[in-house]
Amino acid sequence: MTILKLYGAAQTTSTRRVGTVLYEARVPFELIEVDLRNGEHKTPAYLEKQPFGLIPYIDDDGFILYQTRAICRYIAAKYPACGLIPTDPKKNALFEQAASVELTSFDPSASMVGFETRAKPRMGLKTDQTVIDKEIATLDKMLAVYDTILAKQKYLAGDELTLADLFHLPYAPLLATTGSDVMTRRPNVSRWYNELVSRPCWLVFTDGVKTTIEY
């Protein structure tokens, strides 16, 4: 069997999101480390596979796919036994609703905090605390709504885990590095969040994504 290849960087949030879903779905994969420091992702050979020059992308027996959420959806669809995308039309609609909320409401602010706290220091730039405070405040208001939703059900799309929940990883845990308790100050969000970060698919790559052949 040809093993799926994940081209990315072990320590990056985007690669870890895909690695987390691959592990949750129990899909064997090989991590091919992309040398970001030396610009490998901008070389002609790389751009043939990922024309935007970003990470990650996958090569699944010759099928090339990029963009993290598209990759995760492909994995869940190819391996439906993982249950990460509901097939029932109504449950699927609720999943898409929750996934849209993550993409449009949670990710913009959470990823901005990640940029300020992780990316900027690596680039030798000064972190802007004003930006962090603003985005945390935005997330706090949004998570108040999450708490109401999660008071009625176990996960964002219902009582079963879906990609919509996992998509919040890996940015949600970064919020605590700012000193904020935004992910744990409300009981229902705290319960949901703590369950997510306790899953083996998250814990296994604490030191970075790595090739995983056996589960």
Image: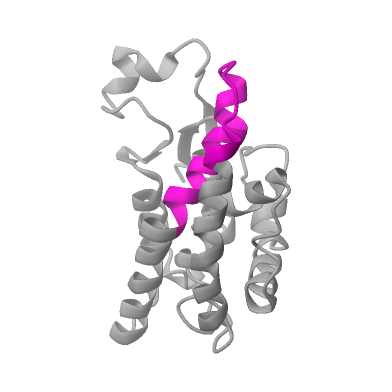
Residue 210 lies in the magenta-colored region: no
**Picture coordinates of residue 152 (x, y %)?**
55, 89
**Picture coordinates of residue 124 (x, y %)?**
59, 15
Name the residue furthest top.
38
Identify whether 84 is placed above or below 20.
Answer: below
**Picture coordinates of residue 117 (x, y %)?**
61, 35
Number of on-image labels: 0
Identify whether 187 is placed above or below 36.
Answer: below
Indicate left or right for 24 with 14 as reference.
Answer: right
Depth order, front residue of 63/46: 46
Q: Residue at x 65, y 60 (%)?
A: 182
Tell me if I can see residue 27 in this picture. Answer: no
Indicate left or right for 107 with 196 as reference.
Answer: left
> Residue 65's image quarter?
top left
**Picture coordinates of residue 112 (x, y %)?**
49, 41
Q: Which residue is drawn at 55% across and 73% down?
A: 144
In the image, the segment drawn in magenta is: 106-131
Residue 112 lies in the magenta-colored region: yes
Tell me if I can see residue 140 in this picture. Answer: yes
Colouring mode (rainbow / by chain / secondary structure / one colour): one colour
Identify whether 7 is placed above or below 155.
Answer: above
Indicate left or right for 179 with 83 as reference.
Answer: right
Identify whether 10 is placed above or below 22.
Answer: above
Name the residue furthest front.
130
Decide whether the magenta segment is chiefly helix, strand or loop: helix
Q: Which residue is drawn at 50% across and 75% down?
A: 145
Depth order, front residue of 87/11: 11
